[in-house]
Amino acid sequence: MRRFSQVDVFTAEPLRGNPVAVVHDAEGLTEEQMRRFARWTNLSETTFLLPPTTAEADYRVRIFTPAEELPFAGHPTLGSAHAWLEAGGVPHTPGRVVQECGVGLVELQRGERLAFAAPPLLRSGPASAQDRATVRAALRIPDEDIVDAAWVDNGPGWLGVVLPDAAAVLALRPDWAAFGGIELGVVGAYPDPGPGEPAVEVRAFCPSLGIVEDPVTGSLNAGLGQWLTGTGALPPSYIASQGTALGRAGRVHVERDGATVWVGGDAVTVVRGEVLL
């Protein structure tokens, strides 16, 4: 039996964010065992905590969707760090956690809430004409509704799409057969948000990863934050709402500090026990 946690991420209220399954002390499990368990949980991601392979890291994590392994993902990063700390993990440096994963080392800060430093984009730049055609077909929208579109891929393969406003994001009814293997992250602004209110609504569509729509997505918000705070389309500090269309209330806190974009969120453990693996 191995220790197990299920953590709701990007919410302080249970059952309102995005859950991640975390298997502690996963050393000795084969990749096939990890894949099988991730398919069984049927959550957007399942993670496995392992000893680090470098002295710089506090722990190592492997991240699986029901369909494949990911080199990086945001809500599993926050949820795994939360579970590791709650289980008694002691970081090398107080106030700082270093996670080792497929993209390398990811730094997390421990403040009012955990926040990770967005890793460098593996692919960036404007969407091609063919990409835009796929977006139009997949989202069932005319080209004039695409305010901007660019690659914001930090591992999962995100193509970011800006729509005219949050209402347009919430109104989407995608054509799942038209995605062609592309993972789409869509964002639209709310009019005149007050202090502490979301500035944007985000939705994440990733059918090729075995997830039709992800409730709340750290990696996507990291890529969108790097892109849109970099161009000035969004302010250096803002809150993103995600999961509204699925009955969730995720809140993602994005803040640019110089060249680094920090992505933070609350987390709460909903299930704690043991798993037979």
Image (spheres, helix red, strand yellow):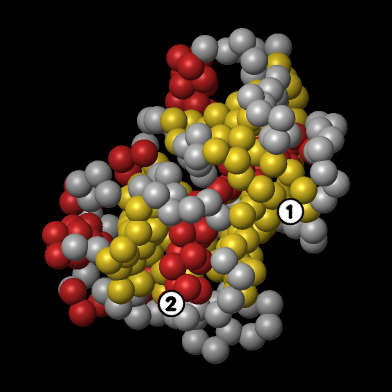
Location of residue 256 in the rendering, given as x and y in whole percent from the top left corner: 60, 69
Location of residue 200 in the rendering, given as x and y in whole percent from the top left corner: 50, 74
Q: Which residue is mark 1?
A: 109
Q: Is residue 171 above or below residue 176?
A: below
Per the image, label 2 sits on a secondary structure element best described as helix
Is the residue marked by circle 2 packed among few (<14), some (14-19), or many (20+) residues within 10 Å? few
Seen as rendered, the residue at the extreme front is 55
What residue is at 44 percent from the left and 30 percent from the top?
69
Q: Amino acid under label 2?
A: Thr
Q: Which residue is mark 2?
A: 231
Per the image, label 1 sits on a secondary structure element best described as strand
First of labels 2, 1 by sequence position: 1
Q: Nearer the viewer, residue 115 or 184?
A: 115
Q: Is residue 102 above or below residue 77?
A: above
Location of residue 136 in the rendering, given as x and y in whole percent from the top left corner: 19, 65
Q: Quadrant of residue 89?
A: top right
Q: Is residue 232 left or right of residue 237?
A: left
Q: Quadrant of residue 51?
A: top right
Location of residue 189 in the rendering, given as x and y in whole percent from the top left corner: 46, 78
What residue is at 70 percent from the left and 35 percent from the top?
56
Label for residue 169?
none
Is the residue marked by circle 1 packed among few (<14), some (14-19), or many (20+) residues within 10 Å? some
Q: Which part of the image, by quadrant, shows the N terminus?
A: top right
